[in-house]
Amino acid sequence: MKTTWLGTALMGLIVGAMILVPFVWTGGEAANLVALILVWALFAIGFDLVFGTAGMLSFGHAALLGSGGYALAILTVAHGWGFMPALGMAALVGAAMAFGLSIFAVRVSGLFFSLLTLALAQMIYVLASTKLRGLTGGLDGIAGVPRPALFGIDLYDNDNFYVFIVVVFLIGLGLMALLRASPFGRSLRAVQANEVRAAQLGYNVQRLRQAAFVISGAYAGVAGSLLASLIFYISPQMLHWSVSGDVLIMTVLGGKGTLLGPVLGVAVFELLKEELSQYTQYWYGILGAVFIAATIFLPNGIAGLFAPRRDRDKGEGR
């Protein structure tokens, strides 16, 4: 789905305004909430490379997110690593985990790919909860995950750590924009459109899918480590399949296959969650109703509102 320059600019302004909220709304609470949104958004734009660009619906991304978080937590808490080296290792662990899963998953497609990623991720969740509890802390998880120490700045202050997350998010967003515009990104879209024709044109479909999955894993690893550091804690819940379901809802809600759509979807999801949870414990059911309504009335997601009329009609006709 192509958006106009005006639509892209408007979406960028919305995201930029969201990023600037804590600077005009003083207090650590706003900074903490927007930082949480940006971390999930980093995870979502990585997920959308696989889902929206390559056309693979993965239910195993929770394993990639959690593996990055655990990598940072174990290296910093148990082995005394510095935060930045551990962050780099978390990206590598996420990519390596994605490569391991992709060895099996990319051999199939469609529903079988989704189910296989779900089964493999749940195996990792069970292992982290039981067999590997000496390493992961089991269901108790690992507490006291640190934040970075950079240039003498107190990043345990939510406002300062928020700025750090903004920088990491913008770097990740910029790299993803370049990647999507590159020949590699165009090749992924060709595979999504018609994998048989892409293979006939000489594309190695399996390798392209595997590369997309590995890159997505690196994004998930970084997001997982930032999330663990943001809340000072990680548990096997981060590996649970429901986390993969959440990022799927966020991406579809915002608009899959677009750069900023998943970011908008994360913002709407988290803001609704924050607001509804104050009034009812059944907030997830209300979010489900919102998601159903969005899929009916906004088939291209929130980003579809900024698309040319012909693209909106095409989405509604699918």
Image: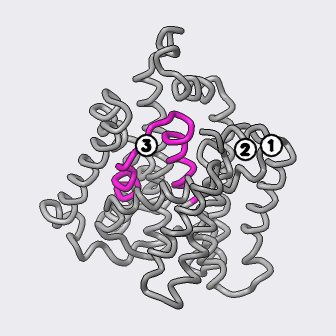
Residue farthest toward the bottom in the current orientation of the protein: 279
Q: How is the image coloured?
A: one colour
Label 2: which secondary element: helix
Image location of residue 48, percent across then percent down = 54, 45
Residue receiving disc 1 = 309
Identify whether 142 is placed above or below 222: below
Label 3: which secondary element: loop
In depth, the one of 146 and 52 nearer the eye is 52
Q: Earlier in the sequence, mark 1 or mark 3?
A: 3
Mark 2 near mark 1, Cβ–Cβ under 8 Å? yes
Q: Residue at x 69, y 37 (%)?
A: 314
Viewport quadrant of the N terminus: top right
Label placed on residue 312: 2
> Could you tell me what secondary structure mostly forms the magenta stretch?
helix
Instruction: Inspect the image, locate mark 3, and give the three-letter code of the amino acid beneath it.
Output: Leu
Which range of residues does the magenta coloring cover? 41-67
Q: Earlier in the sequence, mark 2 or mark 3?
A: 3
Label 1: which secondary element: helix
In depth, the one of 154 and 284 nearer the eye is 284
Measured in 3D between alpha carbons, the distance from the residue under mark 1 to the one under mark 3, in whole angstroms, is: 27 Å
Asked if residue 161 is among those painted magenta in the image, a careful observer would answer: no
Instruction: Inspect the image, locate mark 1, and give the three-letter code of the amino acid beneath it.
Output: Arg
Image location of residue 188, percent across then percent down = 55, 28
298 horizontally vs 124: left or right: right
Q: Residue at x 28, y 73 (%)?
A: 141
Viewport quadrant of the C terminus: top right
Measured in 3D between alpha carbons, the distance from the residue under mark 2 to the one under mark 3, in whole angstroms, is: 22 Å
Identify whether 180 is placed above or below 224: above
Identify whether 298 is placed above or below 227: above
Q: Residue at x 47, y 25 (%)?
A: 208
Q: In front: mark 2 or mark 3?
A: 2
Residue receiving disc 3 = 57
